[in-house]
Amino acid sequence: MSFGSGGPETERPRDADLARYDALVAQRFPEAPGLAINAYWSGWIGATVDHLPIHGSTSHWGNVHYALGCNGHGIALASYLGEAIAERILGLPRLDLEVFRRWVPNIPTAALRWVAFRAVALPLEQRDKQLDREIPRLRR
């Protein structure tokens, strides 16, 4: 199993963090005792205001392609969007990507963007912690 979490990419995971992750896996998957984590990673999460990834092409010739802002779902979405970008480069249509096209609100300053992000993220973080506490009771 691979296990990821947010955090500065400049820090190596501390032994206490790794032990906490091992305990969390044991708690979440009691049906599989001894399930080992074979890889850990951490890093920044690219978050967008509407929780949709951003993708497209830019430059004068349209030959710079990008996909970012996967909101913590980068493993799955980066693979999906990478394939889609490769097909777009080959001239193949990808109508399924239209679901990610949207109006992007204009938020004036970086400080206001941070406040807006925290306003959305804080309740999600609190709900995640609440679910972590409820899981052991639900298994009984």
Image (cartoon, rainbow, N blue to C red):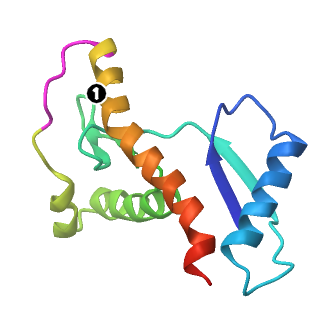
Residue at the spot x=33%, y=13% of the render? 111
The image quadrant where one finds the C terminus is bottom right
Classify residue 89 by image quadrant: bottom left
Q: Vertically, is 116 above or below 27?
A: above
The residue where tag 1 is placed is 116
Classify residue 97 by image quadrant: bottom left
Pinpoint residue 127: horizontal percent, then vertical percent. Answer: 43, 53
Residue at the spot x=85%, y=53% of the render? 19
Residue reaching furthest to the right: 15
How many numbered discs?
Answer: 1
- Can the viewer see residue 83? yes
The prevailing secondary structure element of the residues shown in magenta is: loop
Residue reaching furthest to the left: 103
Nearest to the observer: residue 78 or residue 108: 108
Q: Which amino acid does label 1 sit on?
A: Ala
Residue at the spot x=53%, y=59% of the render? 75
User: Horizontal placement of 130 versus 55: left or right?
Assistant: right
Nearest to the observer: residue 125 or residue 88: 125
Range covered by the magenta-colored residues: 104-110
The image quadrant where one finds the N terminus is bottom right
